[in-house]
């Protein structure tokens, strides 16, 4: 393929539709050239190239499908917004906001009573209209006799309709609309006749003959849009109150507004994953060779002086046999999340289901982060550090010591960056310690308003990029606050330090299966949602290149001006 096609493939999201077609044609032509007809036997190299072409073609198809879905979603959103705007403007209003005249209205603007159809007699006031054979009269009867009917001439719902079920056989086929009571009776008799031929009927299941449907006008149909539903309910309630001329005798009149939104306070952020270099693991695993350690080659070099050269045979040049290093294979972990809900709950309370789904994502993020941390800890060298001064000075000086020793032991360049993983509440310890200290320099810093950026800069001056992790192991999380004394800060900070890119995040992708139903769930009128991610971390550093430090801390503001520091960090 030419360079232009490769460039377009690298950034499909910004390609125009014409460019996507161009890439599609180029991929198809290249594949056809390699594949040939079915009798051709491709070489391994050609098969590998064909695989790359197919995967690239799938990527283009996915981008095209994404755009189609985005266009459809935008169109649906526009339709919903038009409906909401119509509700806001009021029923029967035009774009200019003027109310359309009501036909057949009396002097007060109320709709006149409907005239009886030819051949029909008007029912006396307060009595229901008699059953008649006319389809129009049946529809009118259903509109007058169902719940919510409006004999006083107010706007009713659209009528009740009885429709034959899909399994109905005999005189009336599926989807037949029953307009006469006799029709429904005949259909039920025919169904009973068929069922009498078998003692078990339909295996104990009810034989449905017809379904009742209440047809509501568009302006009264509730959807999954909470704001639109609130507007519909508020407007319908107001109109009903106006028709009934309700008068409040005190208190707050009318029904209260309903807020269908359900806030979720937990976050699904993942700072540990996002703070590491991430690569895609399409095959679900990564195989690599452990890097050699700097110290193992210390005896491979020696100085050969003139005096040594003058005494041949007495000294030999050193040699270190490096051998083969171990091969490491890292497999991704699958982290699954399942949520169960009732069908009625999902249909009639989508906000509740959505809130619990969002909360489940936050809970899953905690498990996923701690899983990655457990892999890092398994390869870490555990060390301890005692309290000497206040938290801020202790942690910064310990970080200085660790990075200096790290560079010295592995002979790293001064420009080598490091990554440190801290509990995020450590930033609060920094602020408390500095706010309490006495011997401080106030120039350029407000000790009562130390920012996160300033703390990052203090660590950055030592070549460290911090990851402020949300979650921690036992002893690194706050317990629930109960009545009584205020909970205190943790007295230890467990943090990790390693050279940048020693640990790499392997992203195996995600598998979202959406809604799951089976016979067991159907029996309880439930359903489940199921999602799964595949990921792990790979240790690409030499041996003993990751450290887990447990620092004893106390944010009392102490400094060398008030406390005599010891000579040992341990």
Image (cartoon, rainbow, N blue to C red):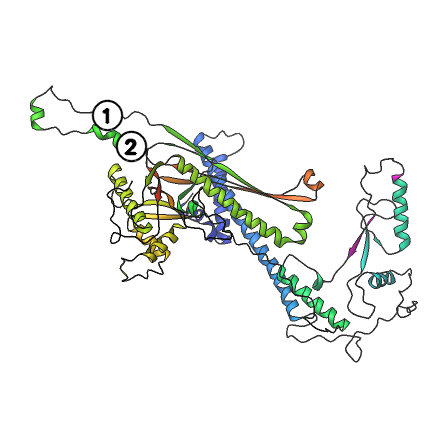
Q: Is residue 295 above or below residue 219?
A: above
Q: Any magenta on residue 202?
A: yes
Residue 57 rendering spot, x and y as whole percentages: 50, 43
Image quarter where the N terminus lies is: top left
Left or right: where 441 falls relative to 183: left
**Among all residues in the image, which is located at the extreme bottom?**
107
Q: State whether residue 506 appears in this view.
A: no
347 w.r.t. 509: above or below:
below
Residue 501: percent from left, percent from top? 35, 41
Q: Quadrant of the C terminus?
A: top left
Q: Is residue 413 magenta?
A: no
**Residue reaching furthest to the top:** 313
**Residue 517 vs residue 429, the one in the foreground:** 429
566 sits left or right of 5 in the view: left
Question: What number is the disc on residue 320?
Answer: 1
Q: Nearer the viewer, residue 321 or 431?
A: 431
Circle 2 residues within 10 Å: few <14, some 14–19, many ≥20: some
Residue located 83% across and 51% down the image: 176
Say which element carries label 2.
loop
Q: Does residue 522 show up?
A: yes
State the residue in front, 512 or 360: 360
Q: Which region of the structure is painted magenta? A: 195-217
- Majority SS type along the magenta span: loop
Q: Residue at x 84, y 62 (%)?
A: 145
Q: Residues within 10 Å of mark 1 (few under 14, many from 20)?
A: few
Question: Residue under circle 2?
Answer: 293
In which quarter of the view is residue 500 placed? top left
Is residue 210 toward the left or the right of residue 479 in the image? right
Residue 27: image x %, image y %? 48, 43
**What is the secondary structure assignment of the residue under circle 1?**
loop
């Amino acid at each position: 393929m030419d360079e232009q096609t490769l460039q377009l493939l690298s950034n499909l999201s910004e390609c125009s539709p014409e460019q996507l077609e161009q890439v599609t044609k180029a991929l198809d032509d290249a594949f056809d050239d390699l594949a040939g007809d079915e009798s051709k036997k491709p070489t391994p190299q050609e098969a590998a190239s064909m695989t790359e072409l197919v995967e690239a073609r799938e990527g283009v198809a996915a981008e095209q499908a994404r755009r189609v879905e985005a266009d459809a979603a935008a169109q649906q959103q526009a339709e919903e917004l038009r409906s909401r705007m119509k509700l806001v403007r009021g029923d029967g209003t035009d774009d200019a906001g003027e109310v359309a005249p009501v036909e057949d209205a009396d002097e007060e603007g109320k709709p006149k009573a409907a005239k009886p159809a030819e051949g029909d007699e008007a029912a006396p006031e307060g009595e229901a209209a008699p059953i008649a054979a006319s389809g129009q009269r049946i529809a009118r009867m259903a509109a007058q006799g169902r719940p919510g009917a409006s004999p006083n001439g107010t706007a009713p719902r659209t009528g009740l309709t009885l429709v034959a079920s899909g399994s109905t056989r005999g005189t009336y086929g599926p989807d037949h609309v029953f307009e006469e009571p006799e029709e429904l009776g005949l259909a039920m008799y025919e169904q009973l006749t068929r069922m009498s031929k078998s003692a078990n009927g339909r295996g104990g299941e009810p034989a449905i003959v017809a379904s009742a449907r209440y047809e509501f006008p568009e302006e009264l149909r509730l959807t999954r849009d909470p704001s639109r539903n609130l507007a519909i309910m508020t407007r319908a309630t107001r109109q009903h109150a106006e028709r009934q001329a309700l008068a409040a005798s005190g208190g707050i009149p009318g029904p209260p507004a309903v807020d269908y939104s359900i806030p979720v306070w937990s976050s699904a952020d993942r700072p540990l994953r996002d703070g590491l270099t991430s690569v895609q693991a399409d095959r679900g695993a990564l195989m690599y060779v452990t890097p050699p350690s700097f110290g193992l080659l210390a005896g491979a070099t020696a100085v050969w002086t003139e005096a040594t050269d003058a005494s041949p045979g007495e000294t030999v040049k050193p040699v270190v046999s490096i051998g083969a290093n171990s091969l490491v294979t890292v497999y991704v972990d699958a982290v699954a999340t399942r949520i169960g809900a009732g069908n009625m709950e999902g249909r009639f309370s989508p906000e509740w289901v959505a809130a619990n789904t969002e909360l489940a994502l936050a809970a899953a993020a905690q498990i996923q982060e701690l899983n990655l941390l457990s892999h890092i800890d398994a390869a870490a060298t555990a060390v301890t550090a005692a309290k000497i001064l206040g938290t801020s000075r202790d942690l910064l000086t310990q970080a200085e010591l660790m990075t200096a020793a790290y560079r010295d032991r592995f002979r790293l360049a001064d420009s080598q960056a490091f990554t440190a993983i801290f509990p995020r509440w450590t930033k609060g310890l920094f602020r408390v310690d500095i706010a309490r200290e006495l011997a401080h320099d106030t120039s350029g810093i407000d000790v009562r308003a130390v920012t996160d950026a300033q703390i990052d800069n203090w660590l950055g001056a030592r070549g460290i990029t911090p990851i402020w992790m949300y979650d921690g192991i036992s002893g690194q999380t706050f317990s629930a606050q109960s009545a009584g004394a205020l909970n205190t800060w943790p007295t230890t900070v467990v943090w990790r330090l390693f050279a940048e890119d020693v640990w790499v995040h392997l992203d195996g992708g995600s598998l979202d299966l959406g809604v799951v139903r089976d016979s067991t769930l159907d029996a309880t009128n439930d359903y489940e949602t199921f999602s799964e991610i595949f990921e792990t971390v790979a240790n690409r550093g030499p041996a003993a290149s990751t450290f887990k430090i447990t620092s004893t801390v106390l944010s009392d503001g102490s400094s060398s001006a008030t406390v005599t520091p010891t000579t040992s960090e341990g």
